[in-house]
Amino acid sequence: MRIGLNLLTLSKDRYGGVEHYVKHLIEYLKKADERVKLFLFLTKPSRDIFDDFQDRIKKVMLKGSKIQTEVHSRIQEHQIDVWFSPVHKSYIPNIQVPSVATIHDVLHTRYPQFVPGELQENNRYYEKFTPSFDAVLTVSAFSKNTISNQLQIPKEKITAIYPDAPEVFNHFKEKDQNNNFIEQLENGFTLYPASYNPHKNHLTLLKAIVFLRDHHKTRIPLVLTGFAASDNRTFQSVLSFIQNHSLQDQVKILGYVPTEAMPDLYAKASFLVFPSLYEGFGIPLVEAMKSKCPIICSDRASIPEVAGDAALYFNPERPEDIANKMLKISHPETRNALISKGMVRSKIFSWDQCAKETLAVFQQVIKRNDKR
């Protein structure tokens, strides 16, 4: 099978969940079937994300103002069997071979004010492209149902396939931390790794920290990770809140932390707090489970589906509820029970299984096309 991967809008800066999904899936698609050959359609800015001269992986470099026109000739030149667009809103019209796209979530339908273009513009985009998809992949049953309901795509056309945490978490072993910046962190901290987007709900979490301090006389250090541009409004609001409420000594902002260092960071954390209002999946939940880090988290969107019985849940719009769950997870018996449940639940997430299920969808759309 010759798979063309549309990676023309992939960013090499500050990896997030979608980028990890793409890179891991590529590696495991190759492992899943030795007959698979992958053609990575790239532009120069993303060229270095992938190594050169990999077995059964070929880079197809495109440039200039006529990239979309050139895509079609390159698909024909390389005899592509199926065209796969795993990156959010990267779709190209009039593809002449079976086409599969991953839609990770439809945040714009729940919180249109958080997404550029808001509701109507984003809906028009999907209305233009989704009819041409032979199949749609997504990352949770929640996302499958929401995509079907909001974008009017038949459920039988959508397959939910769980991703996994980055590969480094699958080899996690408890050990002494060897990252200096982690060793210097205050003991007993809670961790929130997230981009500074409005739906990540940082301010409500900070209000919970203040509530604990002012009403329960309890001080829980908070560590935030995630890249933010200096002009990011959410990030600026976080900085302002910290200053206005005298949290400078209690909240540590680390910025972007390399993936390789994250398991050690989870291992040292007392627990993961995950107050997001909306997730198509929620990779940090799996990262925490695989690092033996107990979880308290939002009860919204896909989050309960992913965390299952391995978390304590709160209403992410109520700082007092978040604060109460922070107090509850400080009890050793609660922590130990959640860690045990997390280790069991983490086994359902597998890149190997994700790749096999993805290949099965590709095979189905190719077979259907052959019968036309």
Image (cartoon, grey):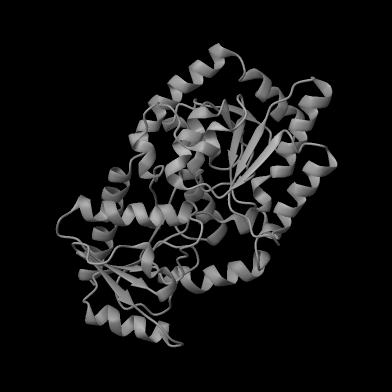
Residue 203: image quadrant is top right
Camera sees residue 194 = yes
- Which quarter of the rendering shows the N terminus? bottom left
Where residue 246 sits: x, y (%)? 82, 37
275 above or below 341? Answer: below
Q: Residue at x 35, y 77 (%)?
A: 95
Q: How many marks?
A: 0
Residue 22 placement, left or right of 153: left
Query: Which x, y percent locates residue 300?
Result: 61, 39
x and y percentages locating residue 275 in the rendered image: 64, 38
Q: Can you see residue 307?
A: no
Query: Nearest the camera: 225 or 350?
Result: 225
Q: Is residue 354 above or below residue 216?
A: below
Image point (49%, 63%), residue name: 88
324 shown above or below 46: above
Residue 308 screen position, x and y as percent: 49, 30
Q: In the displayed orientation, state which residue is furthest to the top.
A: 333
* View extreme (left): residue: 35
**Between 141 and 84, which is closer to the camera in this rendering?**
84
* Above or below: residue 333 compared with residue 291: above
Q: Which image quarter holds the C terminus?
A: bottom left
229 sits to left or right of 213: left
Would residue 2 be found to the left or right of residue 264 on screen? left
